[in-house]
Image (cartoon, rainbow, N blue to C red):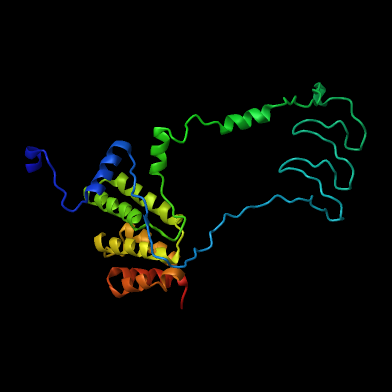
Amino acid sequence: MAESCTKTVEYPDVEPEDFARFIEYAYRNDYRVPTWVHDKTHVKDEALPVRKPTVIEEPKQRATSLFGQPAPQAGFGQPSSTSLFGQPAPQAGFGQPSSTSLFGQSSSKPLFGQTLPEDKKKPRFEGVDSVRAGFDKRSYLAAVEPKTVMLVAFEPKYNLAPDQDFTSVFLAHARLYTFACMRGVDPLKRLTLHKLHRTLLNFQLYERRASDVVELARYAYTQGKDREDDGTKDELRQLVLEYVVREVTIFGKHPAFLLLLEEGGEFVVDFWSLAYKEGNWT
């Protein structure tokens, strides 16, 4: 091959910065993306409501029994300290005899002639909780350590304001995905999809930023592999398509998205098919 003689390889379809990310991945098993670009367009904008995780709070008051009395606080699989009729129940451990017989008489004879150990409370050492908390929170790496800085740089980036243009961030992941597909680097292909998915998952979809995702969709349907005869779609296209349908209430009325629909192509068919299916329209 000519490359073996000249010891050079030309990739006319790859940008230098994308190839640099591939080299970084080859050495570090990860890659960094460019920072967002400041959008100086002055437009009033609002973000979608942030989805907060559901937090189940513990009840502040004890549960009430059928007859209005506080119910015993017994754990799963543990006996209650109160019997069915309101009398104190014997505190017998699992597999251990109770000191009270079936008919309420005190029983001093051990079961099967064995001597039972006294129920002693475990000694509690003061200060253990503070030691445990300090041990769990300890960190030896400062924020400016080279390894810490490198690991933080590899993490997917999220936007915090409507003037943060993420088009360059999205396209960096997408172009490296295309490179991995063309060269058969499957681990890099999966990594790009993972990082792009994480970025989209935490992306605040301001109305001004919908065009960033539209550019990503346009790239995916321009450079990606066309749909198979059995309907199988390229993984990048599928990822972007699902995100657009997920946020269809924002994209459906955005001028940049409507322009993408006017361009036609497989995107229109894929979008309508998935939106119709998920919308449960009849």
Who's the residue at 32% across and 71% down the image? 260
Query: What is the tally of numbered marks visible in this picture?
Result: 0
Who's the residue at 29% across and 61% down the image? 220
Q: Quadrant of residue 229?
A: bottom left
Q: Check the image and name the residue furthest to the bottom.
A: 282
Who's the residue at 49% across and 65% down the image? 46
**Residue 275 appears anywhere in the view:** yes
Up-down relation of residue 11 to residue 260 (above or below): above
Who's the residue at 84% across and 50% down the image? 70
Q: Residue 243: percent from the left, percent from the top?
A: 41, 62
Q: Residue 23: percent from the left, percent from the top?
A: 25, 41
Up-down relation of residue 52 to residue 211 (above or below): above
Q: Pick whichever, 45 or 213, lies toward us.
A: 45
Q: Residue 218: percent from the left, percent from the top?
A: 30, 64
Quarter the N terminus occupies = top left
Q: Residue 73: percent from the left, percent from the top?
A: 78, 45
